[in-house]
Image: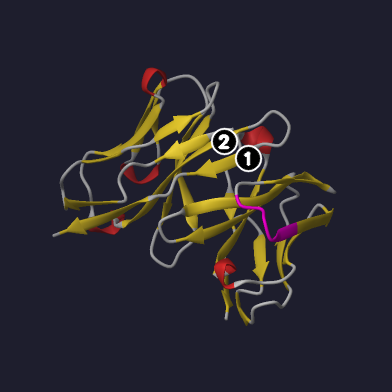
Amino acid sequence: DAGITQSPRHKVTETGTPVTLRCHQTENHRYMYWYRQDPGHGLRLIHYSYGVKDTDKGEVSDGYSVSRSKTEDFLLTLESATSSQTSVYFCAISDRERGGELFFGEGSRLTVL
Amino acid sequence: AQSVTQPDIHITVSEGASLELRCNYSYGATPYLFWYVQSPGQGLQLLLKYFSGDTLVQGIKGFEAEFKRSQSSFNLRKPSVHWSDAAEYFCAVGAGTGGFKTIFGAGTRLFVKA
């Protein structure tokens, strides 16, 4: 299994508070992604990174920011959490040169009250 | 930008029956195409992928998929479904010359009845 660790795995927070989710990989893969999974919507790409300090927006980036200061870590921040951001968040990694297959973390369940 | 459509939200098949899950994509060129499976409470696992070459690709667990350029489709098939195949299936398209990104369809939930 790919070495991907997400933290925290579960979090309950209140509307308006900041939240940071961390994705840590030990595979030295170039690409890292944050997705959210919601019933009826599948997985939607929030942000992704194609190298240190290189990030770009995905399909549903409003309300989220990301940072990647080193290869192994990709942080997703909700500056001011809203109830609509209650979701399961998945981090994924990929090595483009091997065809872009994604390897997923176990997910982080976030509840915003 | 690429997009993916999975027309069937859920499908029910009898154990031992054949299965076909539909997937249509939109992209200007031939993208990378994937099928992933997510069992209840689990993460996602790659079933198979297509980049080029033979348009019929074989995957794990007895699944196969056929790429049809003329229909912009990449349908997933299995000749005989097992109860353990009950899960949610996601079609995905990967593309991008600068930043490579993978976009998923909304998923099809498969129910298997005895």
Give the secondary structure at mark 1: strand
Q: Earlier in the sequence, mark 1 or mark 2?
A: 2
In the image, taking residue B114 as reference, residue A96 lies left or right, namely right
The residue that appears at 51% across and 53% down in the rendered structure is A43
In the image, taking residue B86 as reference, residue A60 lies left or right, namely right
Q: Position of residue B76 (x, y in %)?
A: 34, 37
Q: CA distance from mark 1 to mark 2?
A: 6 Å
Q: Position of residue B13 (x, y in %)?
A: 18, 50
Neighbourhood count class around disc 2 (C-alpha, 10 Å): few under 14, some 14–19, many 20 upward: many
Give the secondary structure at mark 2: strand
Q: Quadrant of the C terminus of chain B?
A: bottom left
Confirm whether the magenta stretch covers residue A30: no
The residue that appears at 57% across and 35% down in the rendered structure is B94
Residue type beneath disc 1: Lys
Q: Position of residue B82 (x, y in %)?
A: 23, 53
Q: Chain of mark 1?
A: B
Residue identified by numbered label 2:
B94
Residue identified by numbered label 1:
B101
Residue type beneath disc 2: Gly
Work out whether residue B78 or residue A59 is closer to the camera in this orientation and state it.
A59
Neighbourhood count class around disc 1 (C-alpha, 10 Å): few under 14, some 14–19, many 20 upward: many
Image height of B80 relative to B85, above or below: above
The residue that appears at 29% across and 57% down in the rendered structure is B86
The part of the image, by quadrant, that contains residue A18 is bottom right
Magenta-tinted stretch: A60-65
Work out whether residue B4 or residue A94 is closer to the camera in this orientation and state it.
B4
Q: Are marks 1 and 2 in contact (CB under 8 Å)?
A: yes
The part of the image, by quadrant, that contains residue A94 is top right
